[in-house]
Image: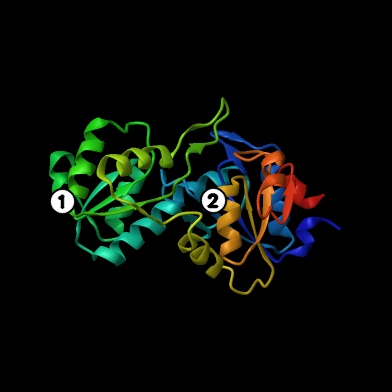
Amino acid sequence: MALADDFDGFLVDLDGVVWIGREPVPGAAETLRALIDAGKEIVFVTNNPGRPPATYAERLRGAGIPVAEDRVVTAGVVTARLAAENVGAGTDAFVIGAPGLKQTATEAGLELLDGEAGREAGVVLVSGHREFDYEELLTATLALQHGAALFATSRDPTLPMPGGPWPGTGAVLAAVETASGAHAEIGGKPERHLFDQARALIGDAERVAMVGDRIASDIDGARRAGLTTILVLTGASSREQAEVADPPPDHVVDDLPGLLR
């Protein structure tokens, strides 16, 4: 019997599980189609806030995976909503991140400040992006020293890429926290906010597992959220790391197609 037969639904990470950078993981799309055809409930979850859910859903559909926009939960959306709920809609915000996160913050009801004006922001949102620079670090630091609240999409130190890991949100956040002395509240994995929101979308499924590639966020966070954990070895974590983890993942498979073996 295949491992997938033990479950009614899955939360499935994207980076390192379905694709690595722009390259699809071999067999991942076919596996996801087979699971959906078998009636499995699937929600995609990602700590990558660089694009809105609609963009990720479109990319998945382009790979032949039938998925609606509301079946993709990003750390960007969760973090922006969490920040707005805590500081209040209409609060001025300085966002370190890609345009997608800034759009998400605006949709959550925050008022974006750019450049030096961001020094007066009441809340700072942080995620990794390739244009991060000293001016952003300085603006965020001054805003936080003046009492702004700090939120971040994750502490993931790296992002899986074909040529090797790239610096992730955790690397950028470390600079902000070190310079300001502030400590961020995390909206994405491994905190429960993202898991709970995604799990609620498949409320009818009784046996649900999280499929991810990073022990520190996907696996540890899912366990704390009460989910069975399945580690795939196509991304950030190795079998050796899984064996010494305490506690280890409930299941370890080489790749997403391993769910069907």
| Gap in angstroms between the C-alphas marked 1 and 2 | 31 Å
Q: Find the residue positioned furthest to the right.
A: 1
When asked about the image quadrant of residue 27, the answer is top right
Q: Which sits earlier in the primary sequence, circle 1 or circle 2?
A: 1
* Quadrant in which the N terminus appears: bottom right
**Residue at x 53%, y 70% (from the top left corner):** 200
- Of 111 and 56, nearer the camera is 111
Q: Which residue is mark 1?
A: 146
Judge depth for marks 1 and 2 and give the one in front: 1
Q: Of the residues shown, which amino acid type is indicated by label 2? A: Ser
Query: Could you tell me if the residues under marks 1 and 2 are in contact, i.e. CB atoms within 8 Å?
Result: no
**54 with respect to 254 (left or right):** left
Q: Is residue 177 left or right of residue 253?
A: left
Within 10 Å of disc 1 (Cα), the crowding (few <14, some 14-19, many 20+) is: some
* Residue at 49%, 63% in the rendered image: 192
Which x, y percent locates residue 240? 71, 39
Question: Is 212 on the left or on the right of 198, as rendered?
Answer: right
Residue at 68 percent of width and 58 percent of height: 36
Q: Residue at x 37, y 44 (%)?
A: 127
Q: Secondary structure at mark 2?
A: helix
Please state the horizontal and vertical placement of residue 58, each as a whole percent of the image: 51, 47
Count of numbered circles on the image: 2
Q: Provide the secondary structure element on which disc 1 rests.
A: loop
Horizontal and vertical percent position of residue 125: 30, 50
Does residue 61 appear left or right of residue 115 in this picture? right
Q: How is the image coloured?
A: rainbow
User: Mark 1 is on which residue type?
Assistant: His
Mark 2 crowd level (few <14, some 14–19, many ≥20, 10 Å Cα)? some
- Residue 186 is drawn in which quadrant? bottom left
Q: What residue did someone put label 2 on? A: 217
